[in-house]
Amino acid sequence: MLKINKILNEEELEKELSREKFIDFLYTHLDQFGDTKSAISKCIDFAFGKNGGLGGFLLTAYWNDELCGELIMNKTGMSEFIPENILVYIAVDSKFRNKGIGKQIAEKGIKEADGDVKLHVEYENPAKRLYERIGFTTKYAEMRFNKAN
């Protein structure tokens, strides 16, 4: 049985599992499509309204009391021209994949978000097909300019 919890602040996160364990789960299960632990930590801060963050929430998913998935949703502070929310991270432990867990977590995140939701996904990421089945469409190709180069 799948249970999904919504987390709105640091205190709620610490009651459920440590921040470090939340970050480690995403870092491990996003595989090559993930970011650094530091980036994940900053995303959590943004969701909790720290350091100028606009808010959002985290989701944790448990299959028979075992952590099997996580999500971070951040508010963008925009609307109409850019969706109000961005689904930044979603991951499912590989031993729980192909059970519809990722879909249920994503749909819960969309339901809990106030307003529209966008996400970024690499073209070769197998999760892209899941997002399309849920109803995400490709509107733009994202391009970035890295000033460090």
Image (cartoon, rainbow, N blue to C red):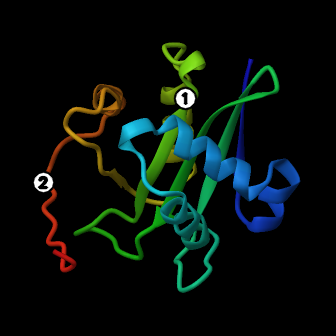
Residue 55, horizontal then vertical, whole percent: 57, 71
Mark 2 lies on residue: 140
User: Is 105 or 13 nearer to us in this picture?
Assistant: 13
Residue at figure coordinates x 31%, y 34% from the top left:
135
Residue 11, horizontal then vertical, whole percent: 83, 65
Q: Is residue 52 left or right of residue 131?
A: right
In the rendered image of this protein, does residue 21 appear above or below residue 68? Answer: below
Q: Quadrant of residue 70?
A: top right
Mark 1 and mark 2: Cα distance apart in space: 25 Å
Give the structural element (helix, strand or loop) at label 1: helix
Which residue, as the protein is rendered here, is positioned at the far front?
A: 149
| Image quarter (top left, top right, bottom left or bottom right) of the C terminus | bottom left
Q: Quadrant of residue 85?
A: bottom left
Few, some or many C-alpha atoms within 10 Å of disc 2 (few <14, some 14-19, many ≥20)? few
Residue at figure coordinates x 64%, y 71% from the top left:
48
Which amino acid, mark 2? Tyr
Which residue, as the protein is rendered here, is positioned at the far top?
A: 98
Mark 1 lies on residue: 104
Residue 45, horizontal then vertical, whole percent: 60, 71
Q: Is residue 65 left or right of residue 134?
A: right
Give the structural element (helix, strand or loop) at label 2: loop
Q: Is residue 81 left or right of residue 69?
A: left
Which amino acid, mark 1? Gln
Residue 120, horizontal then vertical, whole percent: 30, 50
Q: Is residue 23 left or right of residue 37?
A: right
User: Is 86 or 43 nearer to us in this picture?
Assistant: 43
